[in-house]
Image (cartoon, rainbow, N blue to C red):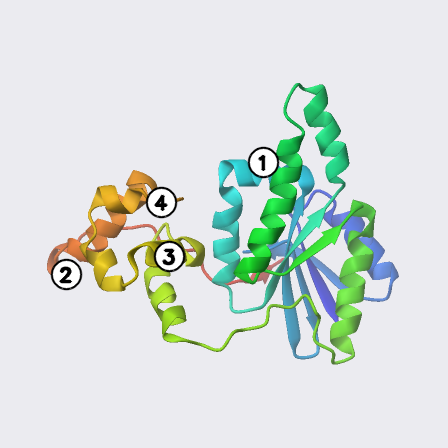
Amino acid sequence: MKIIVDKREDLSKRWAEKIREMGVEVEVSWLEAGDFLVRSKDQILLVERKGVSDLVNSVISKRLFDQLDLLAHQEVPFSLMITGDPKELSRRFKSMGRDPKLVWNIFLGIQNELALSGVPTIVVPDETLVPRTLYLLAKKMETGVRPSLRVVKRSRTLADEQVEVLGTIRGLGIMKARAIIERFKTLRRVANANLAELAKVKGIGNRIAKHIVEVFTTPYEEAKGIKVGRKKSLLYWEE
């Protein structure tokens, strides 16, 4: 078994040492997505770590959903690891004159939303337990038992395919694409929607709505000459 730790993590070297002391092969490398990659036999699990403070800020800034979209496009199962004690952040918010309920609303609300979206979550109350948690995941995978926190793929349906088709548009991803289809019911109606109608969907806005309209209305020959940003490539690592 082997655990790859993203070298951009502040505690990557320290965590790598702790994991290595437990008898697990560790590599500190650059990961395209996620913070840890756990490999054992023919199983693999990608883990994105968020401290409670970073989680709250990511939800407020909406960065979290873009990061989850990137993970959802990887070809391996993934999980979100939340580390730290929300009580500490709640006290900090209160001392700064901010509403401490915001911390709990986000902390509990995001877990409910992720569960409903099928994204497994690991809650680790103390960051010192991160190496041990990864070690236990690796050991469970080595015994041939699938981790209970591994994403379980649903039976593929036509609805899944519709979401995936729309989700390939730049700026969308699986979650936003699902929100759009749930609003308009069919891809045909999405294609016929105008900018104002699309912009009303939660998380879309004018910029993304404008691009969706362009995708469905720009003639093919004209579209050949229009450059757009490309999605990041699939997961890989290097020294």
Spatial CA span between label 4 and label 2: 24 Å
* SS for dot 2: helix
N-term-proximal mark, 4 vs 1? 1
Pointer 2: what residue? 220
Q: CA distance from mark 1 to mark 3?
A: 23 Å
Q: Residues within 10 Å of mark 3 (few under 14, many from 20)?
A: many
Q: In which quadrant of the rendered view does residue 196 lie?
A: top left
Disc 4 and disc 1 in contact, CB within 8 angstroms: no
At numbered mark 4, what does the secondary structure look like: helix, strand or loop? loop
Residue carrying label 4: 204
Check disc 3 and give the amino acid type. Ala
Q: Tag 3 or tag 2, which sits nearer the N-term?
A: 3
Q: Which residue is pictured at 29% across the width and 50% down the height?
A: 228
Q: Nearer the viewer, residue 105 or 123?
A: 105
- Residue 113 x %, y %: 56, 52
Q: Secondary structure at mark 1?
A: helix
Amino acid identity at mark 4? Ile
Mark closer to the chain start, 4 or 2: 4
Q: Is residue 17 left or right of residue 149?
A: right
Quadrant of the image containing the C terminus = bottom right
Q: Looking at the rendered structure, which numbered label has been put on residue 137?
A: none
Say which residue label 1 marks: 57
The amino acid beneath tag 2 is: Tyr
Mark 2 or 3: in front is 3
Foreground mark, 4 or 2, reads 4
What's the residue at 60%, 46% (across, down)?
Answer: 109
How many discs appear? 4
Left or right of 89 on screen, residue 69: left
Q: CA distance from mark 4 to mark 1?
A: 19 Å
Q: Is residue 227 visible?
A: no
Residue 212 placement (x, y as % from top left):
26, 51
- Which label is found at residue 177? 3
